Amino acid sequence: MEGEPTLRLRIFDLNCWAIRYLSKRRQERVRLIGDTLRQEGFDLVLLQEVWSEQDYSDLKVKLARCYPFSHYFRSGVIGSGLCVFSKFPILDTLLYQYSLNGYPYMLQHGDWFCGKSVGLGRCHRHGSHSPFAFPLSLQLHAEYCRDKDAYLPHRLVQAWELSQFIRHTSKAADVVLLGGDLNMHPEDVGIRLLRGWTGLRDAFAEATHFEGCKKGCTLVPGNCFTDKSELLPFPLGIRIDYILYKAISSFTVKCEELKTTTGPAPGMNIPFSDHEAVMATLHIQRQGQPACATLGTADLALADVVTEARTEVGVGLRAAQQQRYSSGRMAVLALLLLLLQAVAALATLAGLGAEQPFPKLSFCLLAFLALGVLILATGLHLFHTMEVKMLHGTEDQMWMALRALQERP
Amino acid sequence: MEGEPTLRLRIFDLNCWAIRYLSKRRQERVRLIGDTLRQEGFDLVLLQEVWSEQDYSDLKVKLARCYPFSHYFRSGVIGSGLCVFSKFPILDTLLYQYSLNGYPYMLQHGDWFCGKSVGLGRCHRHGSHSPFAFPLSLQLHAEYCRDKDAYLPHRLVQAWELSQFIRHTSKAADVVLLGGDLNMHPEDVGIRLLRGWTGLRDAFAEATHFEGCKKGCTLVPGNCFTDKSELLPFPLGIRIDYILYKAISSFTVKCEELKTTTGPAPGMNIPFSDHEAVMATLHIQRQGQPACATLGTADLALADVVTEARTEVGVGLRAAQQQRYSSGRMAVLALLLLLLQAVAALATLAGLGAEQPFPKLSFCLLAFLALGVLILATGLHLFHTMEVKMLHGTEDQMWMALRALQERP
């Protein structure tokens, strides 16, 4: 890129809400998204919640000419739902699955089955020799109840893993981009942790020019697909979809413009999704001097954020330990019941208590119940053991980070 | 490190085989390992299969003075078993869990429960300003039968993910080290893929001076803990534990010496583990010119290796698709049986066939069986769906890599 003029990069990010059989007017919306992307000609398109590979394939065919390069990230039972379309060749991809992502038995929330992950792609600009960007498309665990948010520790573990992943992989690029539905409000501890620990900047806060929903909200009451009752405490809506960026080495990035859709798609009567799309125009320029590290400027504030996050993870850890204990106790009780039954059956076989008829049916039903409880409780115990390990591991890592922050001169 | 003399780095790597209740003479061996490490004073110690956190804590206490910095990587139900002891501060760690790691129902192999993963640590040398190394300690899926190796596709997915992980994270370091039990012979496709795709060099092949088991074997018949029948086709033993390294940016690394233990630990009557320890002495030096990329020198050979690996992954994919289909069919059959039983029960309740006594016991037993099969088959179906997704994803990524190799000028 030496001696080249400024690169203007137009990015489109959208949580597509394209769940087969469940999302309203899915096919119509996916067609609409495809048409708009083809007309607008962005440089980079980051989509989330494209759960059906068929939808991805349809989009790929439709967008083949404008966006010759694309990738779908496969993971979990259902898939990650993440895909990227690009004008620039995608050199390489890597998928990082978060170690915690909700509970398999919370079927109504379903996050566990999606294998939520962060997909990393390395792009390469024509005519340039080094890869210039890492577009990341991702989604964190959803928040189902803000007041009593049982998933907060899991989301914080994810935010921490994401931050660590970005720190460790970003050195190989000139510019890092992160786009996706983070399921966190701008002031939440997870976002502060992510931004503080990686040095990523928020396109909404930095944009010279902004156009769209008030305060950059991406889940707004004006969208006909949103759940109005969820948004009651937030009359303007909430901002949970982000485009974040950061320049590495000798580059500078500026956000010239940020736009969001405002309910119905331009010129149409339905929105693209229940989320609003976020569109950013970035200016990337090489500068003579390597940019100084953005980290370290506010170590004290960062230490506070890490401490806050660590406290929340600690709360989650104690809850998980409690659940591990309860499920273990339940499994032991079920096992005892089964053993008791076995003894009773053996006693009957040996001819003891033969004067009374043996209650075969209720015996079978009870054994069936005890076995079911045993299997379920053992499964839960294993799951919560894993959860405890991961929460404990994250607590350790955060402690290590705090120590490093404090020891920094 | 500017203007500093050569850095001599002594590394110790060992698969400790420290499984509580299962490994022979575990506590004695862990004590022995601790004593030796304290006496020898290595710079960096990479241990695998330290499954009990208590063993890690004991080692940590014992080694606190010689190796003030350490980290235990937590993951899976049992744990990752990986830990690192270091003379240099560990700045940062990251754990990457492989997306595939055997089958949960293969209880006798147990790989699935271990959450096999690669742990990444960033070390920092006193007096130097930039982190100088990435010690990696890891373990891949074990090989249980070489002739009919059902886990080969999983191990290849792991080797590929490991390679990608190293490529993406290595730019932030000056030197990359990789130590661990790779469960692959030196000529296996997985090792060739890993070395080719990352440019890592094998300490055994590069060492100026070697001392230890013939051909650098680390699983040898002379070790009293090894399974002699497994080693029958290999009279000298096999080499599956490695120390690999690579210099990034303006550094050079040379392997001055490589040693392995040869059965019993020095001066003792028992070995450290069923594996032999690998000890390397590396010389790290800053050079004026940035080292040129090691990749690209043998693109053609590399393309062949990637193609070979992709073929094997494809074989695994087809097997997984077959298993997904079988388990799905089984689930549907169990569901049909349950429905049939429900119809029969309803018919009896409605008074049909009242002339015959209703066989309550066998009815209950059959329903119990059908439900059990349904739950099991559904679980298997979900698992194999996930497996198919990950194998498919890896196939895609390998295809992308091949295209990039072919398009390279």
Image (cartoon, coloured by chain):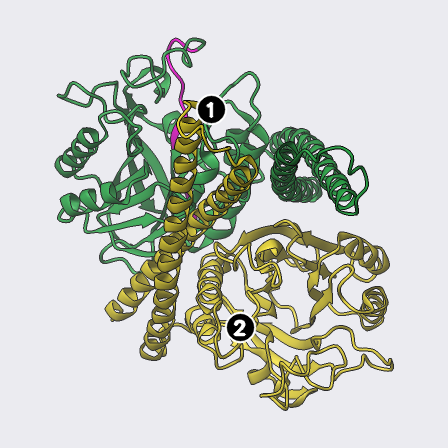
Chain colours: A green, B yellow
Q: Is residue A244 visible?
A: no
Quarter of the image where one finds residue B1: bottom right
- Front-most of residues B367 and B4: B367
Identify the image quadrant of residue B325: bottom left
> Are the two marked residues, 1 and 2, in contact with CB atoms closer than 8 angstroms?
no
Task: Indicate whether A255 appears above or below B218.
Answer: above
Q: Is residue B152 visible?
A: yes
Q: Residue at x 31, y 78 (%)?
A: B300
Name the amino acid type tagged 2: Gln
Identified at 30% across, 17% down, the residue is A213
Which residue sits at x=38%, y=63%?
B319
Q: Is residue A409 left or right of residue B116?
A: right
The residue segment tinted magenta is: A234-249
Q: Position of residue B353 (x, y in %)?
A: 41, 30
Tags 1 and 2 both on a single chain: no
Q: Residues within 10 Å of mark 1 (few under 14, many from 20)?
A: some
The numbered mark 1 sits on a residue in which chain?
A
Q: Position of residue B346 (x, y in %)?
A: 42, 27
Q: Is residue A352 above or below residue B281?
A: above
Query: What residue is pinned by disc 2?
Result: B287
Please provide percent x and percent y for residue A165. 50, 47
**Residue B182, numbered label:** none
**Mark 1 lies on residue:** A186
Q: Residues within 10 Å of mark 2 (few under 14, many from 20)?
A: few
Amino acid type of disc 1?
Pro
Asked whether A238 falls inside the magenta stretch, the response is: yes
Provide residue A43's location: percent of width, then percent of height.
Answer: 23, 43
Q: Residue at x 56, y 22 (%)?
A: A149
How far, Cα to Cα, is label 1 from label 2?
46 Å
